[in-house]
Each structure stands twice: as structure tokens, then as C-alpha cells.
Amino acid sequence: MNTQHDHSRRHFLASSAALLAGSLLPACASTEKSNAMNADKPLFDISLAQWSLHRMLQSGQLDNLDFPAYAKKTFDIHAVEYVNQFFKDKARDAVYIAQLDRRCKDEGVRSMLIMCDGEGDLGHADEKERTKAINNHKPWADAAKTLGCHSIRVNAASSGTWEEQQQRAADGLSRLVAYAAPLGLNVIVENHGGLSSNGQWLSGVMKMVNHPRCGTLPDFGNFCLDWSKQDDPKFWYDRYKGVKEMMPYAKAVSAKSHDFDEQGNETRTDYRRMMRIVLAAGYRQYLGVEYEGDRLSEIEGTLATKRLLEKVRDELADEFVATNKIAF
């Protein structure tokens, strides 16, 4: 036997084994670190939808510029969702939007999205009116960009047959997305009455638009097909079915609440059932607290909603892994 060759061979094998072990160790360590981080990370974060405090804002008790600091100090919530009607004339006011952004940065509060209402129907039957609505939304997209939001929430109101409304809504959304996408913004649709509260219809619109920057904002409670007949159960779409149909396109979720029982559970929505639907879709981003009741004060109702979300989050922690699967 050639002892020099044998020594070289043993040296090569030992070196190869060391290199292999060295290459595996960081991977294992990285995996363990990743698992530890996921174990520490909550299943989802919580934001505050401005509508939860709409009476305070409408009465002047709370100023829009103070909303981010108020969300942090009163509710310990560090992410906010605006409603455009509370600063309706400020979309083009660069100084005001910059001031609002500075307030957020000073408080360490994140701006998530702007909910846009009253700017026209993106699915209007008249193409000129549809174009007008698209243009009305553009300043809000600009404002959302300045604030660092990931989305503007819009409505897909339309008229006509099922198919006509889908085509018109898809056209309006596609044209608005063409403006918003280069800004790094999503255009997301909430179930907000009419056919938009039909999950099958809205998911069909999403398929027609077929753009990664166009998505949905499922709201736990807005599944009334005709608000003028909201007292008739026949005009309500199944909320669990609707959320399930919207979740594949969701880039935000509104945890709507109205009232609570003695155990702190929401009386209209089974939050555990609803959150299983949301989490099963792979959603691990923010849940927006949106209290809309009148028995509790806005502060009490908002706190009750947050507590329920936290409780359900803890209960479901073992069922779902806290990984980020959906990007804004």
C-alpha cells in the first residue's frame, strides 16, 4: 500500500466531512432560528380602522391629525387605517399629508391604507362617469404613497346585470391599478353592499382584473346585498362563505364588531370560526379593528374588539404556524 497516497486520501475525506458538516450547521442553525422567530411572532398583527372612532372624529372631539397618537396611547395599537371623509379636502394638500406622516413617524405608528368613499362609482355604466371616478381616486393614491400605505380601499359599485357589473367594475379597477401600481400601491375592494357583498361576484371581478396589485379587503360584517332591506335576512350573504371566497385575494381584513356577550364574544360573528377561515388562507398580516356598535362607547367597543382578537389569536396559535405568506 502506498502510505503517502493513503494519507492524502484520509486527509481529503476528513476535509470533505468537515466542509459538509460546516455547510450543514449554518443551515440547521438558520432553521432553528427561523422556527424560534416564528414561535415568537404572533399569528397576525392588529391595526385600528379609523371608523371605530367615527363619532369622535365627526364631532370634533378627535382631530384627524391626532388619530395616530391616540391609537397608540389609548389602545396600544401601532398601525392605523384612515377613512378619507375625515380629511376629505386634504388629498391634494401636500403640507397636510406630510404633517400627518410626520405625526406617524414621531409616534412610531404605521399607516396601512386609506379607505376611499364618495369619489364616484368605479363600475359606473357611463364610461365618462367611470373615468371621473378613477381620476377622483388618484389624489388619494398619491396621499397613500406619501404616508407609506400599502393600499387604497375602494368600492366596486355598479349597475346592470351580473356580467355587466363585473365587466364595468373590472374595467374601472384595472385602469385605477394602472395608476397605483407604479406607486407601489394596491387597489383593494371591500364588500360594501350590492353585488360587492356577494363573494362569488367579487372573486369573479378579481379574476377578470388579474393583477397582483388588485385585491380584496374582506369585512366580517358588510355582507348586506341591499342596505335598504337590511332587516330582511334574505338580503344577507353568508359572511363565512363570503370571507372564504374573498381571502385568496385579501391584502387587508376588517374585523367588524357591533356588540359583545358576557364572555367577550362578538354577538353577530363567530370570531373563532372566522379567524380559522382567514388563517387557513395563509393570511398573516394585519387585522383591522372596526367597531361599529352603539351600546358600548367607541373606546370600550374598540378595546373589546382588540381583546377578542388577542384571545382568539392565542387560542389558535397551536393550530397555525406564524409565517408570512402574503405580501402587501
Image (cartoon, helix red, strand yellow):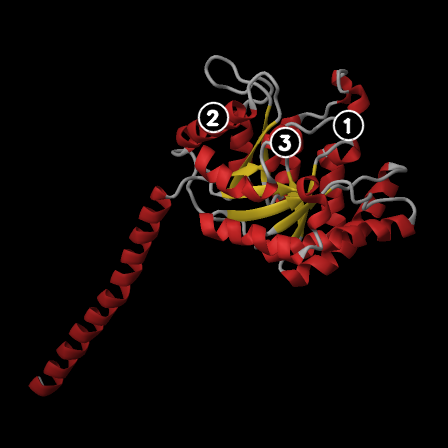
The residue wearing badge 1 is 225
In which quadrant of the rendered image does the N terminus lie?
Answer: bottom left
> Foreground residue, 325 or 108?
108
Q: Is residue 46 visible?
A: no
- Residue at position x 91%, y 52% from top? 128
Q: Where does residue 236 sit, x and y in percent of width and height?
A: 73, 23
Which of the two discs, 3 and 1, labels the residue nearer the N terminus? 3
Residue at (85% x, 47% y) in the render: 168
What is the spatial separation of the Cα atoms under label 3 and label 1, in whole angstroms? 23 Å
- Please name which of the two marks, 3 or 2, marks the residue nearer to the observer: 3
Say which amino acid is labelled 2: Leu
Q: Can you name the residue that lies furthest to the front here?
A: 60
Tag 2 residue = 308
**Residue pushed farthest top?**
262
The front one of 80 and 122 is: 80
**Label 1 amino acid?**
Leu
Residue 66 position within the rendered picture, expressed as x and y whole percent measured from the top left:
54, 41
Looking at the image, residue 235 sits to the left or right of residue 49; the answer is right
Q: From this view, report whether residue 216 is shown above or below residue 272.
A: below
Residue at x 59%, y 35% (from the top left corner): 254
User: CA–CA distance between discs 2 and 1?
Assistant: 27 Å
State the residue position of label 3.
Answer: 54
Query: Given contact means CB atoms under 8 Å apart, are the residues at marks 3 and 2 in contact?
Result: no
* Dot 1: element: loop
Side of 49 relative to 224 (left or right): left
Query: Which mark is in front, 3 or 1?
Result: 3
The answer to whether 183 is drawn above or below residue 41 in the figure is below
Specify few, some or many for label 3: CA neighbours under 10 Å numbering under 14, 14-19, or 20 or more.
Answer: some
Whole-percent x, y for residue 184 in the image: 62, 59
- Foreground mark, 2 or 1, reads 2
